[in-house]
Amino acid sequence: MKILVVEDDAFVREMAVAGLEDAGYEVIEAASGGEALRLLQAGIAPDALLTDIRLPEANGWIVARAYRERFPELPVLYVTGYAEQMQPVPGGIIISKPYRMAKVIGVLATWAA
């Protein structure tokens, strides 16, 4: 399963990537919403999207909607310190920061089943 991780905080992104790779996932990473949208334009096709909401260039809501236009069934997992500002795409799940990788991996495992 290929996961696109979109997170502007380098430390948080590195921890997420390492945790997902340790769990056996293939990971693509983007440091901004704009970078994630450029990956979409380049033809990147993830099996799931893990995105922060507050991002430079384009927020997580915009990124998720753009990916869902191309991949309507794409599972989306939002991680944010601002969970009260919810606008998830249908089928998206929000996890509040700080979060445990075990929780993220548990959600991804249910989607992969």
Image: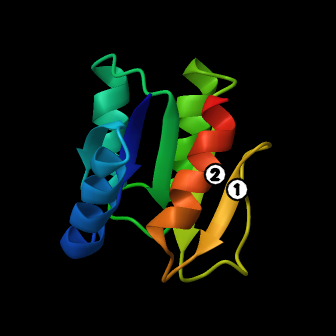
Q: Are marks 2 and 1 in contact (CB under 8 Å)?
A: yes
Could you tell me the amino acid type at mark 1? Ile
Task: Please name the residue shown 27% across and 67% down the image.
Answer: 15
Q: In this figure, which residue is indicated by the disc labeled 2?
A: 107
Question: Tag 2, which secondary structure?
Answer: helix
On the image, numbered disc 1 is attached to which residue?
Answer: 93
What is the basis of the colouring in this image?
Answer: rainbow
The x, y position of residue 104, in whole percent, is: 54, 59
Give the CA separation, mark 2 to mark 1: 9 Å
Dot 2 or dot 1, earlier in sequence: 1
How far from the left and from the top, in percent, is residue 84? Answer: 73, 81
Q: Position of residue 59 (x, y in %)?
A: 47, 59
For this rendering, which residue is in front, 94 or 61? Answer: 94
Q: Is residue 66 above or below residue 61?
A: above
**Disc 2: CA contacts within 10 A as few (<14), some (14-19) or many (>=20):** some
Helix or strand or loop: what does disc 1 sit on? strand
